[in-house]
Amino acid sequence: EENDILKPVQLTEELLLKSGFEKIGVNFQKEGISIWYSSYAKCYQLRYCLIGSDVERKINIEYYHELQNLYFALKAIEL
């Protein structure tokens, strides 16, 4: 079946490094974006706060295309 051909690529440390992220401690950073692996959520996460808010929010990133889309949305450039 056609849907079996296209499968999402799991986000890995290797892909983060190949995409220009630098490993600093447990975080991966690039141009003000910080991502880390959450063993609780069993995926990578991006943490942020909205301007004027103390509420911390998290975005789970399981697949590479999710990181690409998020990076483009935040930076307006492709990863």
Image: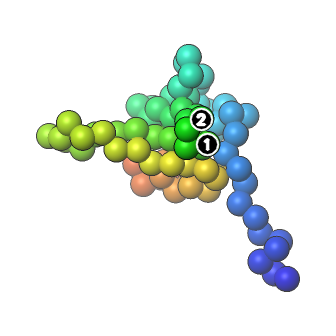
Kind of residue at badge 2: Ser
Q: Is residue 63 left or right of residue 70?
A: right
Mark 1 surroundings within 10 Å by alpha-carbon count, few (fewer than 14), some (14 through 19), many (20 or more)? few
Secondary structure under tag 2 reads loop
Residue under numbered circle 1: 42
Q: Which residue, as the protein is rendered here, is positioned at the far top?
A: 25
Residue at 64%, 36% (x, y): give it: 16
Residue 68: x %, y % from top left: 56, 52
Kind of residue at badge 1: Lys
Contact between labelled residues 1 and 2, with CB atoms less than 8 Å apart: yes
Tag on residue 39? Answer: 2
Residue 24: x %, y % from top left: 55, 18
Q: Which residue, as the protein is rendered here, is positioned at the far bottom?
A: 1
Q: Quadrant of residue 1?
A: bottom right
Residue at 40%, 48% (x, y): give it: 74
Residue at 71%, 50% (x, y): give it: 10
Residue 28: x %, y % from top left: 55, 28
Residue 15: x %, y % from top left: 70, 39
Label 2 to label 1, Cα distance in Å? Answer: 5 Å
Q: Quadrant of residue 42?
A: top right
Q: Is residue 30 in view from this perspective?
A: no
